[in-house]
Amino acid sequence: MLKTLTRTALAAVAVGGLMASAAAQEFSFRFQSSDPSGNPNFELQQGWAESVKEKTDGRVEINLLPVESIVAHNETQDAIAGGILDGHITDTSYFAGKDPAFGLIANPVGAWSSPDEMFDFMADGGGKELMNELLEPYGLHFIGATTPGLEAFVSKVELKGVDDLNGLKLRAPEGLVQQVFAAAGAAPVNLPGSEVFTGLDKGVIDAADYSVFSTNHAQGLHDVAPYPVYPGFHSMPLVEISMNKDKWESLPPELQTVLEESVAEFSRSQVEALAENDLKAVEEAKAGGKITVIDWPAEERAKFRTIAMGEWEKVAERSENAQRVYDVLTSYLKEQGLVQ
């Protein structure tokens, strides 16, 4: 009798535990990243997903999938609206084809000299509100922004400021980045990322907009282009964390707050982790004695920004939303003294 009761009690405890576990997990979401499995960014994003489960005591669970797992990298917005995915972590510029405003807010070339500037704009300069104005008509809600940080610039020749860009053959992605560099006097060249090293080595290009310093260094770009500009002066992508608007609104307010706070915390930790990798790579590069790291002075960065703003104006003319982004962004930059 005692053994039977003991087995019954244990079974009851086990069932109770399963029921409690099931009750704890109230919301389960499937997100897709724009980064591949094994990429440092994706690994950090997985840490964010795990932190959400921990911070909500298991009430919210996010299954984060690498790029292309369910849909193509530029199809996640439609997939979220259609219920195929619940959310994504992605570069907002992938949706510039729907509205040029997405491209302008995602990477206003030349605008930012540090992640902190962009984070402050998102939090207190109207950026968060802009993102939801853009996303909610498509059925998404913007939770928060992160970024891998300022991309460094790779060059075979010394670039001490804007004037040195004149006539420079450089690899840059199509769109606003090429527009801005061309306006600054450079000669942009279309090259896929896989051909950057060869292009530099063979003299097809003199410089390249490619990635962050540590990635450039690990891939040997500084061996053929020993004059990197770091910190970068041109490109810093906005990576949004967004989800289905209806599913966001189904969350209790306290869970919405936890998600927003978790993204803010994650964005800082991602920037710190990748910046640490960059600093180590910079020290290694300097110690080798063959690489000269150049840091543009504030006045040169401001000069490049002014040129970039002329190209932002052209983008702003393409849609009402793009004009709205331009107005809010430039007002913020002027208030902060980042442009004249």
Image (spheres, grey):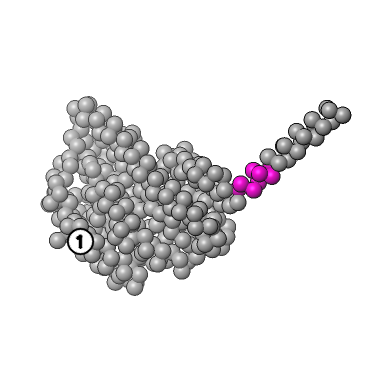
Secondary element at tag 1: helix
In the figure, residue 335 lies in which quadrant?
Answer: bottom left
Where in the figure is residue 219, as x and y percent of width and height? 34, 35
Quarter of the image for the N terminus: give it: top right
Where in the figure is residue 325, as x and y percent of width and height? 31, 66
Type of amino acid at the residue the image marks with label 1: Glu
**Could you classify mark 1 by the number of other residues whose Cα lies within 10 Å: few (under 14), some (14-19), or many (20 or more)?**
few
Q: Is residue 244 above or below residue 283?
A: below
* Residue shown at 83% from the left, 27% from the top: 3
Q: Which residue is denoted by mark 1 in the rendering?
A: 335
298 and 38: which is toward the camera? 298
Instruction: Answer whether residue 124 is visible to the viewer in this image.
Output: yes
194 lies left or right of 284: right
Instruction: Answer whether residue 90 is visible to the viewer in this image.
Output: no
Characterize the magenta stretch by its predominant secondary structure.
Answer: helix
* Residue shown at 23% from the left, 38% from the top: 225
* Residue shown at 33% from the left, 39% from the top: 272
Residue 81 among those drawn in magenta: no
Q: How many marks?
A: 1
16 lies left or right of 27: right
259 and 195: which is toward the camera? 259
* Residue shown at 15% from the left, 41% from the top: 158
In the figure, residue 284 lies in which quadrant?
Answer: top left
Quarter of the image for the C terminus: give it: bottom left
Range of residues picked out in magenta: 18-25
